[in-house]
Image (cartoon, grey):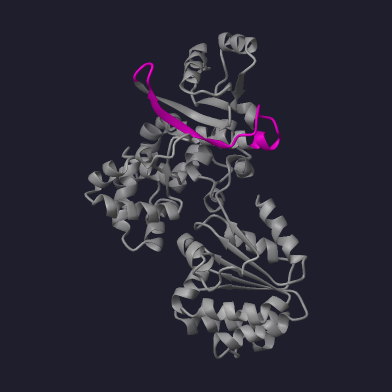
Amino acid sequence: MFIGRDAELKKLNEMYGSDKFECAIIYGRRRVGKTTLIREFIKDKKAVYFVAREADGMLNLNGFSSDVYYVTAKELAKNAFFSDWERAFDYIYQISKDSRIVLAIDEYPFLAGGYRPISSILQAHIDAQFKDSKLFLILCGSSMSFMEHQVLGYKSPLYGRRTAQFKIMPFSFFDALPFFEQFSKEDKAVLYGIMGGIPEYMSKINKMKSLSENAIDLFFTASGPLFEEPSNLLKQELREPATYNGIIEAIAGGASRLNEISTKCGIESNKCAKYLKSLMSLGIVKKELPITDTSSKKSIYLLDDMMFRFWYRFVFPNMSGIVSGLGDALFDSEIIDELPAYMGLIFEEICKQYLFREAKKNALPFLPGKVGRWWGNDPRKKRQEEIDILAYRKDSALLCECKWTNTPVDIDVLYALGNKEGLFHYNQTWLWIFSKSGFTDRIIAEANRRDNVRLVRYEDMI
C-alpha cells in the first residue's frame, strides 16, 4: 500500500503532463521512500527503471542496456548491449523524440562513482538532444552530499538542467499515522518516536502485535531487522564508521557542544567539526541554535534521526544482553519505564508539526516567521531558562510548553510559562500548553479567564 507523498506525486504527474523534456532530481537518506515514490509514479507509464550498482561503468552499462531493451525492444534484452554511454543516450533520444517515456536512474551516485564522465556525457545529451524530446528523466540518489554538490551544485556539469528537485524527508507524525492504525493514541506517538518517520522501518510494524512486542522483535532480538541498522548505515555511507559511531554515542550520552564531543571522543575540534558536518549531511545529526540567535557560540548538536536516538540510548548499551537472548527481559524491566522521559523531545517535535499544520489552516494568532526551541539566560533571576517552542514574527510571539506526562498539567506550568514572557519585548504574546494527559480544573479555569492562553490535549491533536 502506497502511503503519503501526495504533494510529490502530484507534482511529478503535473510535470509528466507537460509532454516536454523534464529532469527531476530525487534525493534523501536511505530507507526514506524514494524508490517507492518513483515506482508509484511510473506504475501506469512507459518507463525504464535502472538501479546502478557500485561497479565499473561497463557493468552498469550492460545492466542499463538490458533494462532499456526490456521496455523498448524486448527481443534484444538478453543479447544486445550498448558499446558506450553516448550510444545508449542516443538510443534514448530516438525513442523519446515523438513519444513520452520515463527514464529513472536510481542510485545515480554509484553510476557516477564507477564512471566519472557520466555527468558530462549526460549534460551534453540534454543540451544537444533531450531538451527537444519528450523524455522524462529522473536521477535519484541516497548520498545527500553527492546529490547536493555533484548533481545540483553549481560546479556540476548537470547544474541548471533539472526542472524540479525533491528532497524526500521522513514522514511527519501526522503523515505517518496510517502506519499505526491499530494502536492506541499514545502508542502511535511512541512508535513514531522509535521509527522516526522512516517508511521502511514503519512498514515492518506488525499491527497484530503490541508496541512492546514490535520493539522487541525489531530491535531487541539479535535477528531483528533493526538490531544493527545504524551500524549498517554508517558502514554503507562513511569511510570511518568507528569514529562516527563514537561521535554519535557521545551525543546520545549528553555531549552537545563541539568541545564536549571532541573531548569525549579524543578528536581535535577541527576534525570533529568535519565529522559532524558529514553526519549532518546524512540527516543523523543536527546543529541547533536558540531560535532568536545567530551566534554560533550558542550552537549545540543533537541527534536528528529519531531511530538513531532510540537505538543509541536503549539498544547500543544492551547489545551483549540482546545477543545473549535477554532482549525481551531488558525491554520489560529497564526500558519501557524510560520511554516517557525519552518522549519529551519527540513530543516537542510533534507539537511543532502541529503548529505548522494549524498555520496552514490559518488557525494560529499570526503567521510565524520562525519556529523552534529557545534557551538562554534570564538576567532577572540570573539563571538559564528554556522554552520548548517559540514561534515569532515581528512583534508577535507564541510561547509553548509541551508535557508528555502521565498526570494532568496544573496551573504552575502556566504561571512558569507566563513568567518567561518578560524575557522578550514582543507587543503581543500567546501562551499555548500541550499535554498528553489533559489539564486540571484549576488551569482550565485560569485559561478561560485569559484571551492569550490555549490548552491543547494530545488526543485532540490527532
Q: Check residue 361 for magenta coloring.
A: yes
Based on the displayed image, in which of its 4 quarters is residue 458 positioned?
top right
Q: Position of residue 353 (x, y in %)?
A: 58, 37
Position above or below: 215 against 224:
above
- The answer to whether residue 87 is seen in the rendering is yes
Q: Position of residue 451 (x, y in %)?
A: 65, 15
| Left or right side of 233 for 111 | right
Q: Residue at x 63, y 40 (%)?
A: 181
Front residue (pair 46, 454): 454
Query: What residue lies at 32% left-to-right and 37% top-to-bottom?
Result: 254
User: Quick one: 268 or 336, which is closer to the camera?
Assistant: 268
Is residue 343 a member of the stretch shown in magenta? Answer: no
Residue 317 visible from this viewpoint: no
Q: Nearer the viewer, residue 223 or 79?
A: 79
Q: Residue at x 28, y 53 (%)?
A: 270
Q: How many marks?
A: 0
Question: In the image, which residues are magenta?
Answer: 357-382
